[in-house]
Amino acid sequence: MRVRAGIVGGAGYTGGEMLRLLINHPSVDIAFVNSKSNAGNLISDVHTDLFGDTDLRFTGELSSDIDVLFLCVGHGDAKKFLAANPVAEGIKIIDLSQDFRLKAAAGEDWVYGLPEMNRERIKNANYIANPGCFATCIQLGLLPLAAKGLLKGEVHVNATTGSTGAGQSLSATSHFSWRNNNLSIYKAFEHQHLNEIGESLIQMNPDFDGVLNFIPQRGDFPRGILASMYVESDLTAEEAQALYEAYYAAHPFTHVSKKNIDLKQVVNTNKALVHVEKHGNKLFVISIIDNLLKGASGQAVQNMNLIFGLEERQGLALKAAGF
Amino acid sequence: MRVRAGIVGGAGYTGGEMLRLLINHPSVDIAFVNSKSNAGNLISDVHTDLFGDTDLRFTGELSSDIDVLFLCVGHGDAKKFLAANPVAEGIKIIDLSQDFRLKAAAGEDWVYGLPEMNRERIKNANYIANPGCFATCIQLGLLPLAAKGLLKGEVHVNATTGSTGAGQSLSATSHFSWRNNNLSIYKAFEHQHLNEIGESLIQMNPDFDGVLNFIPQRGDFPRGILASMYVESDLTAEEAQALYEAYYAAHPFTHVSKKNIDLKQVVNTNKALVHVEKHGNKLFVISIIDNLLKGASGQAVQNMNLIFGLEERQGLALKAAGF
Amino acid sequence: MRVRAGIVGGAGYTGGEMLRLLINHPSVDIAFVNSKSNAGNLISDVHTDLFGDTDLRFTGELSSDIDVLFLCVGHGDAKKFLAANPVAEGIKIIDLSQDFRLKAAAGEDWVYGLPEMNRERIKNANYIANPGCFATCIQLGLLPLAAKGLLKGEVHVNATTGSTGAGQSLSATSHFSWRNNNLSIYKAFEHQHLNEIGESLIQMNPDFDGVLNFIPQRGDFPRGILASMYVESDLTAEEAQALYEAYYAAHPFTHVSKKNIDLKQVVNTNKALVHVEKHGNKLFVISIIDNLLKGASGQAVQNMNLIFGLEERQGLALKAAGF
Amino acid sequence: MRVRAGIVGGAGYTGGEMLRLLINHPSVDIAFVNSKSNAGNLISDVHTDLFGDTDLRFTGELSSDIDVLFLCVGHGDAKKFLAANPVAEGIKIIDLSQDFRLKAAAGEDWVYGLPEMNRERIKNANYIANPGCFATCIQLGLLPLAAKGLLKGEVHVNATTGSTGAGQSLSATSHFSWRNNNLSIYKAFEHQHLNEIGESLIQMNPDFDGVLNFIPQRGDFPRGILASMYVESDLTAEEAQALYEAYYAAHPFTHVSKKNIDLKQVVNTNKALVHVEKHGNKLFVISIIDNLLKGASGQAVQNMNLIFGLEERQGLALKAAGF
């Protein structure tokens, strides 16, 4: 089958990454790429690495002759967009903002699009709330425990994100002169992704008391998230390894490495790697993703593949940057 | 058709990049990946970004049940390898070292594998000498002029390469603490690629006197080459633009940008972008490639595609890193 | 007064930084710079940023006509050096290795050279064990609590170090192609600095049960350590701020910032900045230093200043890199 | 003697670097730091690496109780400032903008503040036009030739600047996600510094026909400029080395290295290093500076030292970053 896709908010970072993916996706036709700020401009004038790959232009119009609509707009703007532009029934929506991630805000129509947690529900969903990048990385480190009800006590998480996680708007902390060779912490204990993580964990592990201490860091690299986390556990190292391997055995993008891992193993791929160690009574997990791929647009395409019955890895067998 | 490929020297940078490409190439089966130093080891233990993508292991053996052999060994070692391990007739060889790039050393059996110059000859070649990375980038900036006999006088070239251009061996200039935020020049006027560039240019532009002043720089990034060059020319800016566009019109990876270009437009792709300006009597050209792809393993796959009659872009429609 | 200084191990990173400092120190004369591997070579041939600043050469000899000896050799080698080369009485020794940091190994003659903890003892010391870089950064984040006996329960620490922390030897994780834009974790819960930190904390806070969970990270920058840590506390934010400000009021290099901090505020200085926040029942502290200065050679010079009655900041009023 | 200094435009990059220098300068008192945009704010709230070093605040006022005024405002704004705020006679002015660098614009009252060219005139100057960063680096590579009338024919220059050279305003090319690991060219053959370079060269080498081909590059590092340049010359390598050494023998910041050089040798110092090679009939020169120091604020302080009869290196014996 072929899938006709529309993109709203195509001029931003996640919109650009969506285009990089869909242009090469063997089952997708791009119907339109909507951008208020860039209507009429060549896509390759904004996402200049696409020069030579596409002659498409941004449009200010919308079309309902599509199978799926990707919303790549800012937080808060997805809800507004849908209120102002009702989408015809039958068109699937995949929203990359945070607007529909929490049950209370989204209602029952929206499925939280983390395939490693909700794959079957995603296949039958109409509307997907694509998870946050930090939330994806951290949950992939904890899901196997939560699924067995083994999360208890406090979870201690530290995660460092690349600069593309903050979007393309210019700010003091995105200035090269400042960020190069720098490191800093922001929103300690208070990052907004704590809500969606907590909701997932409680759903899977209902008696988890939900104390998750999260220290987010701004790294001096453009792509990727490395999260580390630990929790008290009675599992041995071998039991934990087996638990994680079993949990992810059927998931084509998430792999459990017996060896220590480093961020660049996943940069420019849709993969997640997870590594588990036991130290004393602490179970220690490292989890890595590319924030623009598994943490955003790659996962959105993965969700699209699931919804339309395509092979899950289609269009996502990406060559790692490696370096 | 399907192509069975063998790789010798699979543990180095170009060998790793070859694997990243061939694993996803729709028409290729990897027959073996030979590595003296890593025989028996998992490929993903060396090229750790391939963890989850392949269970292949390096082998110390060779096999002649292949259609094409990629030589990814060091300069000088390709010649030695072929002397010690005669390759059965009918097997195509693509050598990424510099051993067979010069006519005097290679003889008539080897074709210089720059598709933008030799596409038809490559299609019928048995043995391909894959061009050097600097040589590729610089020649792509000059070929349209040389093809019209318009190169004359001195050519002034400055080009900066990423650290992967120097391979994975550890050295003072590859130490992170040294190279981060640093810039330096090496082999000014004396880089070994001058020979292959000169041979190409004279072949196409026989009355070119061959004075090419080349300043190579070590950049503080892992991937990519940006070369700039200028030469006196009577062409107007419009004529030059038209000349370059016409020359590359039929070549799917090399594109002429009317806008200024920057290195990251091609990182992690097999593309080359070229930009032409006229200043006074100088024609000024900027040329960019990814040194491991268009400058090495990507171009080798492109040559393989041409030899076996596959679509030239097959397996090479790579998602740009972008960031 | 003038201080005559000898340096052993002058060709390494901490030896180089010692030279950068002492060459400009208004009260110090460099008597000799010993290096086995570089005897006879110009110092500026190894530490090339000193070209134009000094004509000194490394020597293979030692001299006892000195007031202070800095040991900048590897871990384990300081003890061996002193066994093989007894130092005349009256010469002060400042050892930058870990060999004498722990009481059990060092005995009573050695004072742990953290001025913010031991300033008065340092002034009267003969032998100084200069603290580790991680240990310095983490202790500066915890000392005010420990001094009041307020450390209890578990302390959760994550700290990221620059590449110079691993010294100048070449290794896979110091290769530019690998480390650029990368992040990784090593020795989680098991870093050797835990011992010296634990010893200090228990000494100041005897009923602290000493559980310190420490996740060390390798950052993709050459200089600096950013550590974050949290612990349960009954202090309000204001009380904590006041406690930290009071503790460091008399210390010229360690400052408590009410605003959030980032690593580059201290790079190329001997300063440490500490920032304190309260979140729920957690007291959260960020601490930053330059690992080669406050974390090594700068602190060694600070200790020298204290021992010889010089103004503590002498030779250490360094211009920050800023960028 | 003590020098009372006022700074206008203290919130920008060159203003910040001026403050980093003057705060530690042994003969300078900072009378005021004027900033329209930050009047009333703590200096350390803007230049956060100065936290702990100064409690000074920006002011919206000016004072004439000063010996020297540093103008650290944007190009064009220095002229406007002086028109609107006449400076009392006897106060020296050092302007870091380009407003007074060209004779035609500046008139005879202003001296071009390149000590390696104009030291004696600077000592007696009232008003100094501080050279541009590219202009400083390139001129230091050519002055010894120009001084002997040996510049002829075309000069070929390529130079790469750090991001701080573009100031702190936010722009697409200063965004970390874009600039990290990137390289690009701008204003090829047309950089505005060509004018001041040309004026200097013609002044020293009146029969030089002034063709200087200059390719400026944006590097992915914050500090530093590396320029390389070549010109036809009859000098042997030894003669050139001797010529350069003789020319700079009396200049404390500019040194001629027989060994190849790399950018980080001068980062965070006021030094310039120059390296000369001969290749065929080409004399090839590499020149490196820190754009914010020898290329801006450091040179301004050097000029101040000369004007007030202070030792030329006073306050400028800076510890190199090294890494």
Image (cartoon, coloured by chain):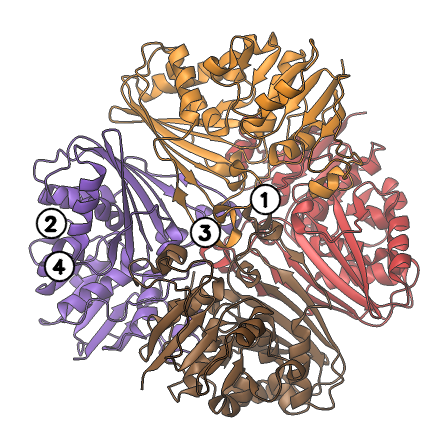
Chain colours: A brown, B purple, C red, D orange
- Could you tell me which secondary element the residue under label 3 belongs to? loop
Q: Are marks 2 and 4 on the same chain?
A: yes
Please give the residue where the numbered disc 3 appears in the rendered image.
D181
Amino acid type at circle 2 is Lys
**Chain hosting mark 3:** D
Q: Are marks 1 and 2 on the same chain?
A: no
B200 left or right of A129?
left
Frontmost residue, A191 versus C161: A191
| Quarter of the figure with residue D159 | top left
Disc 1 from disc 2: Cα separation? 47 Å
* CB under 8 Å between discs 3 and 2: no
| Quarter of the figure with residue A114 | bottom right
Please give the residue where the numbered disc 2 appears in the rendered image.
B103
Q: Are marks 3 and 2 on the same chain?
A: no
At label 2, counting other C-alpha atoms closer than 10 Å, the crowd grade (few under 14, some 14-19, many 20 or more) is some
Looking at marks 2 and 4 on the same chain, the residue that comes earlier in the sequence is marked by 2
Which circle, 3 or 2, is nearer the viewer? 3
Q: Are marks 3 and 1 on the same chain?
A: no
The correct choice, above or below, for C257 with respect to A4 in the image is: above
* CB under 8 Å between discs 4 and 3: no
Residue C12: which numbered mark, if any?
A: 1
In percent of width and height, residue D283 lies at 32, 24
**Chain hosting mark 2:** B
Q: Quadrant of the C terminus of chain C?
A: top right
The correct choice, above or below, for C31 with respect to A58 in the image is: above
* CB under 8 Å between discs 3 and 1: no
- Could you tell me which secondary element the residue under label 1 belongs to? loop
Q: Is residue B167 visible from the viewing direction of this image? A: no
* CB under 8 Å between discs 1 and 4: no
- Could you tell me which secondary element the residue under label 4 belongs to? helix
Residue displayed at 69% across by 13% down: D91
